[in-house]
Image: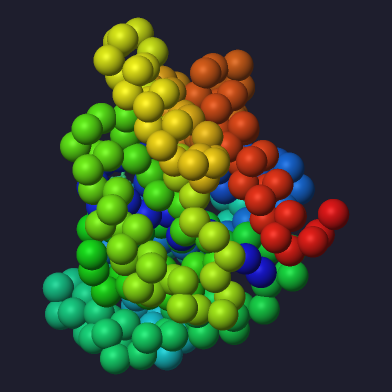
Amino acid sequence: MKIIAVVSAKGGVGKTSISANVSAALARMGRTVLGVDLDPQNSLRLHFGVSPQHFDGLARASLSGASWRDSILLGPSGDYVLPFGQVNEEDRQDFEEILRTEPTFLLDQLRSLNLAHNALVILDTPPGPSVYLRQALSAAHIPVIVVLADAASYATISMIVGLIEQYCMPQPHFVDYFYLVNQVDRSRQLAGDVADVIGAQLQGRQIGVVHLDQSIPEGLACNQDVLSYDPHSRGAHDIMECAAALDRIVSAYTGEY
Ligand SMILES: Nc1ncnc2c1ncn2[C@@H]1O[C@H](COP(=O)(O)OP(=O)(O)O)[C@@H](O)[C@H]1O
Ligand SMILES: [Mg+2]
């Protein structure tokens, strides 16, 4: 099992959309994929067609000592999702206390799921430094930093890389970190230029670019991943390319092929 943590310093860059759509793409490529929502916003499940009224998830399971396995749901594209779950303020704080005091809690829980050896876990995280991000980085084999092609997003990269150096790199299972540039708008000269400059600066660590494409939010509104919603869209094409790149990286590092 390999754990990919999708991270960013800023919110709204597309971590949840990328996590869900790349999970669906990897499942279509034959991988066993589990999307895990480590963000109290609990929105990853919506991309898997799970009802907004569904309250179950990993936070409550952790507090009651139940197996995370019991909260896993099968999505429409054959990938699985483990929602964060809906919790009240007190329970959220209690769960965060567990994460604060047990640094390997997430990794231990994921290992206890006994997933297939070639399975991928895609971890969706809240933006910026938090106990969730720290757990995700400690558990991750491969962190993927989502950035926008703008100066503000670019300026936050060093902060996230600093956290990766602190929490990821010392782990024996750490593989390498990568970037994904999201919401690139080629119709705007500046955004296209910035995307190219960022691409050049990321020193071969770039997994891919996902263009600004309404098929991504529209798919979510229809409870579908972009590959089902509009397979010929730019967004679907970009997501497939990123998933294929990630698949190649995992295969290369694990010597699967
Ligand atoms: N490539 C894209 N093209 C168009 N809209 C996008 C794209 N990626 C994300 N979005 C939209 O941006 C908003 C924030 O995305 P979200 O995945 O929730 O970000 P995060 O999880 O980083 O906060 C959502 O409305 C989402 O539909
Ligand atoms: Mg999110």
- The answer to whether residue 175 is above or below residue 114 is above
Residue at 74% over, 55% down: 251
Please tell me which residue lies in front, 253 or 62: 253
The spot of residue 110 in percent (x, y) is 54, 76
- Apparent side of residue 235 relative to residue 253 in the rendered image (left or right): left
Q: Is residue 83 visible?
A: yes
Please tell me which residue lies in front, 84 or 149: 149
Please tell me which residue lies in front, 243 or 36: 243
- Apparent side of residue 201 relative to residue 29 in the rendered image (left or right): left
Number of numbered discs on residues: 0
Instruction: Give the quarter of the figure containing the N terminus.
Output: bottom right
The spot of residue 202 in percent (x, y) is 44, 41
Instruction: Give the quarter of the figure containing the C terminus.
Output: bottom right
- Residue 83 placement: quadrant: bottom left
The spot of residue 56 in percent (x, y) is 39, 68
Residue at 27% over, 74% down: 131
Residue at 70% over, 47% down: 248
Q: Is residue 70 visible?
A: no
Residue at 36% over, 17% down: 192
- The answer to whether residue 179 is above or below residue 241 is below
* Residue projecting furthest to the left: 89
Q: How is the model colour-coded?
A: rainbow
- The answer to whether residue 24 is above or below residue 239 is below
- Apparent side of residue 71 relative to residue 249 in the rendered image (left or right): left
The spot of residue 142 in percent (x, y) is 53, 60
- The answer to whether residue 210 is above or below residue 39 is above
